[in-house]
């Protein structure tokens, strides 16, 4: 009802839209799950020489020991149905089971065999692990009927397609072609889309934006689906509110990658490489993996207000942004101070 601003009819439209979006997203998540489990199952089966042993890899140590509870739960259920076959057990194991093989404790297993499950990826376990974990969280949200009203669906689905492309490019291409989520996004009741701007704490981020027109933060940090970013620093919301042009998550961030990107034939990659080089040179973001927002410097969708919006309160209750807040461009345009943005 909050999203519908108390309008019962709009609330029902939103509820229906949320259900449609969940269904469309689950279709693609199901396709990915089949791809992932087949890829992992095939590699581990070959690695233990399952054909010669005559025992499924998931019933052999150390694999069985690692996830015995999950395996036995599925076996017990299938046994009651008299369907306890190898293939049925594999099909019955959850996404959490398959996503659990990419943590740091399985680094040696990755080097020995699991990297082959992703022939079109970079070969970096941490990259796959971060993608799988992000998808797992999104899948749980969808499957548990949580609200998707403020989820950046396009961003989350891009992670699904990216992981699929690491496994099988043809399958990933097919998934993109049959994907319905973008159509459902377009059908969302327009009157309910109001919180279009994220406000971030920006003592360091604001000067960096002025220099490089980008925002950097930790990989995996959740943001609602917004179009603009506002900066709060020096107890004020700054007068430039750039449009979010592109968002990258779990981005490899080092000097070698910055050099590679800056020599690319693709303009977006050259811009990203320059941002990376600026961040490394300034010392604010050392080598690692980060989330990066490429932001506008000007243009028709870039919002500017005449003066900063000040925080007029003092004392314990004066804190305005600790991690992030959401507001709308409409509120920003008519606000007298930061408290009018709430």
Image: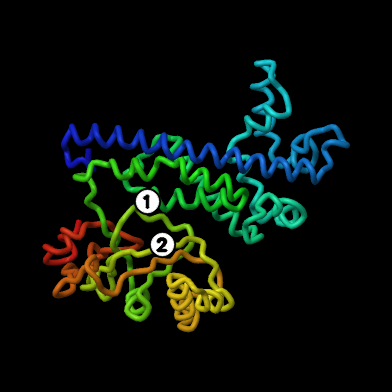
Figure quadrant of residue 120: bottom right
Q: Are marks 1 and 2 in contact (CB under 8 Å)?
A: yes
Residue under pointer 2: 247
Question: In the rendered view, how is the structure colored?
Answer: rainbow
Q: Residue at x 69, y 16 (%)?
A: 82
Q: Residue at x 66, y 21 (%)?
A: 78
In the image: residue 200, left or right of residue 273: left
Which is nearer the eye, 57 or 315? Answer: 57
Residue under pointer 1: 152
SS at badge 1: loop
Figure quadrant of residue 238: bottom left
- x, y percentage for residue 6? 16, 38
Which quarter of the rendering shows the C terminus? bottom left
Mark 1 to mark 2: distance in Å?
11 Å
Which is nearer the eye, 41 or 168? Answer: 168
Q: Which mark is residue 92?
A: none
Task: Residue 68: tell me if it is visible.
Answer: yes
Q: Residue at x 34, y 79 (%)?
A: 207
Against 299, residue 100 (above or below) is above
Neighbourhood count class around disc 1 (C-alpha, 10 Å): few under 14, some 14–19, many 20 upward: some
In the image: residue 179, left or right of residue 203: right
Against 26, residue 319 (above or below) is below
- x, y percentage for residue 275? 44, 76
Against 307, residue 152 (above or below) is above
Task: Residue 106: tell me if it is visible.
Answer: no
In the image: residue 79, left or right of residue 29: right
- x, y percentage for residue 147? 35, 40
SS at badge 2: strand
Which quarter of the rendering shows the N terminus? top left
Q: Residue furthest bottom?
A: 281
């Amino acid at each position: 009802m909050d999203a519908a601003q108390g309008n019962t009819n709009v609330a029902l439209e939103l509820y229906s839209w949320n259900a449609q979006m969940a269904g469309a997203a689950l279709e693609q998540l199901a396709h990915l799950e089949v791809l992932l489990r087949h890829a992992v199952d095939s590699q581990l089966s070959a690695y233990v020489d399952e054909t010669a042993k005559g025992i499924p890899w998931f019933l052999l140590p150390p694999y069985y020991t690692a996830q015995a509870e999950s395996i036995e739960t599925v076996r017990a259920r299938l046994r009651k149905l008299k369907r306890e076959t190898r293939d049925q057990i594999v099909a019955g194991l959850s996404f959490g089971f398959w996503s659990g093989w990419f943590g740091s404790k399985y680094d040696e297993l990755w080097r020995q065999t699991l990297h082959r499950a992703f022939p079109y990826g970079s070969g970096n376990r941490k990259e796959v692990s971060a993608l799988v974990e992000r998808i797992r969280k999104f899948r749980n949200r969808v499957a548990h009927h949580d609200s998707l009203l403020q989820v950046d669906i396009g961003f989350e689905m891009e992670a699904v397609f990216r992981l699929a492309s690491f496994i099988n490019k043809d399958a990933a291409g097919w998934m993109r072609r049959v994907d319905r989520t973008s159509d459902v996004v377009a059908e969302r009741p327009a009157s309910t889309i109001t919180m279009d701007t994220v406000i971030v704490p920006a003592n360091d981020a604001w000067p960096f934006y002025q220099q490089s027109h980008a925002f950097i933060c930790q990989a995996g940090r959740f943001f609602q689906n917004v179009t603009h970013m506002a900066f709060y620093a020096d107890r004020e919301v700054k007068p430039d509110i750039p449009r979010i042009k592109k968002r990258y998550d779990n981005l490899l961030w080092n000097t070698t990658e910055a050099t590679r990107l800056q020599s690319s034939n693709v303009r977006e990659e050259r811009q990203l490489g320059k941002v990376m080089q600026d961040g490394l040179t300034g010392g604010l973001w050392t080598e690692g993996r980060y989330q990066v927002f490429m932001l506008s410097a000007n243009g028709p969708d870039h919002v500017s207000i005449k003066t900063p919006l000040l925080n007029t309160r003092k004392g314990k209750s004066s804190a305005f942004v600790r991690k992030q807040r959401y507001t709308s461009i409409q509120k920003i345009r008519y606000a007298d101070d930061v408290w009018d943005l709430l």
